[in-house]
Amino acid sequence: MSQAPAIDLEDGRPHGAEAWDSEPWSVHGSAKQPRHVRQSSNAEAHVFVPIASVVSCREERLKSMRRFTEENPRARFAFSWSLLGLGTICIGLLLGLATYADFDLENGDTPGEQIRLYYNFFSDVSIMVFVGFGFLMTFLRKYSYSAVALNFCASSLVCAMAVLCVGAVQQVWAEGHDRIRVDMPLLINALFSAASAMIAFGAVIGKTTPTQLTWLLVLMVPIYSVNLYLIENVFEALDTGGALVVHMFGAYFGLSASLVLTRFRHASEQQGSKHPDNGASYVSDIFAMIGTLMLWVYWPSFNGALVGVPAIVGGVSTTNTYTEAAHSAQFLSVVNTFFSLLGSTLATFALSGLIGRGKKNMVHVQNCTLAGGVAMGSACALRVSPGGAMLVGMLAGAISVWGFTYAAPFLQRTIGLTDTCGVHNLHGMPALFGATVAAIVSLWQNEDYLFHATGVQQLAWQFAAIGATLAMAIAGGLASGCVIIIITNRGRPLDADILFDDSMWWLFEDGEETAETLLLLLLPLLLLLLLLLPLPLPLPLLLLLLLQLPPPLLLLPTCLHEAAWMAHGTGLGV
């Protein structure tokens, strides 16, 4: 007899499509019932097991939270003190090192001109960072508060730090300015840094405390700034949309940190996809789709934000000749990215349906549809043709679907790499593919579209930039992960019972916890009533609704009633 799959108390669906034989759940003796109901010969077991599971899980989680608080008495306040300290440092450095950019008013370089050129793109990228990435990560049904709120908070902190770090590396260290000149391109670069940080956040979400996450991203910003300078100024790689510096760097930095945080210890079982709280509900998936659509709509602006206009550093134009390539770069970036997104969307829906034997996977729709925007980040300003851009997007979507379906489980099973949001499949591999496409396409581009004299030289430097980005991201992620886990949690990972659940860090509305406690106290009486009196199905639900219990708790008494109904129907009842 097959083992009963774990029931999701949020939406009533089992973990794993194989538990359902890819068929929908139905009730009252239908031929399409779950396998564990059709084959079980003891209906009473399905009544007592959910109760024991709920009580046991709740007790273990409370014990783990209590033990964590006792061992780390300052953990609840460390996040607030960290933010206050880091914010104070940023203010002091901005007061001492930063100033507004100087403008050449006689040559038309005015503040108003910068706003005209950049502000619409600045606004679009801000929506992607603060809304798109935040809502995309709300698929975790017990971590949605932190997904949106910590995305908001961490992005704000990273933006402030990136103005200092990126400005210091590019303007003070590389160009010899005495102070950081704050202009619109620098602010957009700060948003790009926040986007890369949120990608890294997606790899470790649910497996860190808010304090650990804060310091992980703080350590990331200086490394990101150095890598940005190397890619743009030393290697001079094709990366106008940030496939290398934003997506690849953020993905592999976060994955390396995740590898350290899980410490290889039962990672594939306790801290990965097998964790009971590492999953979505119907409602949380809908909220995550809001993030997907926001990112999809604004991705052309992301790739085209800093191309096609003269680079302005401290009010001085660094572009002496405005070539045809410069004139068409922003147009090409927007058009190519749009066609690439179309391709990845079509490929995702098609392949997801084929892999799922006619049923599409919401994880694929939420993520893989965006792979075209990632892949076009390096080649977006090149003349790849609309059809070529759509082909790149379709291949990127296929790579992303393959990653979610096969690569992610393999990496988790073999090396214990847990990737909560699948950033390797959405950002890592499509970015690597896109950077390779840019290197190959550069072979037949006009030299005006390249940063090196010939396409062969551009190809060589492109692959060198890929290797450098991977090296800095992986080394930086491993080192940063080791630092934060030693400093903030005495050298050991969080207990598995408190992962992917942010109830320890947030204040909930009055009555939410008391209602759950009331249900647990009433379970014995409720069980007795349901076994002895097989009432019509709506009555237990109506009783719970009158008690104003939260919707996720409605499933348990319903399952009890189903089992009781079957027990009476098959002669197994009391």
Image (cartoon, rainbow, N blue to C red):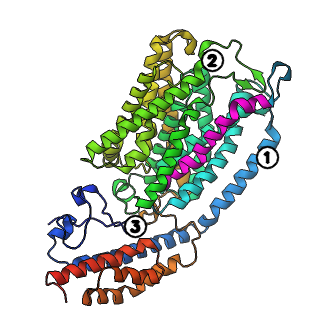
* Relative horizontal placement of residue 231, taking residue 169 as reference (left or right): left
- The amino acid type of the residue labelled 1 equals Gly
Q: Is residue 264 above or below residue 553?
A: above
Specify which label sits upstream in the sequence, 2 or 1: 1
Q: Can you tell which of label 3 and label 2 is closer to the viewer?
A: 2
Q: Visible in this render: residue 239?
A: no
Say left or right for 185 vs 44.
Answer: right
Q: Label 1 vs label 3: CA separation?
A: 47 Å
Q: Amino acid at mark 3?
A: Glu
The residue range painted magenta reads 112-139
Say which residue label 3 marks: 10
Q: Residue furthest right?
A: 106
115 drawn magenta: yes
Residue bearing mark 2: 327
- Dot 2 lies on which element? helix
Residue with the mark numbered 1? 92
Q: Quadrant of the N terminus?
A: bottom left
Alpha carbon of mark 3 to alpha carbon of mark 2: how far? 53 Å
| Mark 1 Cα-neighbour bin, 10 Å: few <14, some 14–19, many ≥20 | few
Q: Position of residue 393 (x, y in %)?
A: 41, 31
Instruction: Choose the circle earlier in sequence order: 3 or 2.
Output: 3
Depth check: 467 or 273 in front? 273
How far apart marks 2 and 1 lie (CA) works out to 40 Å
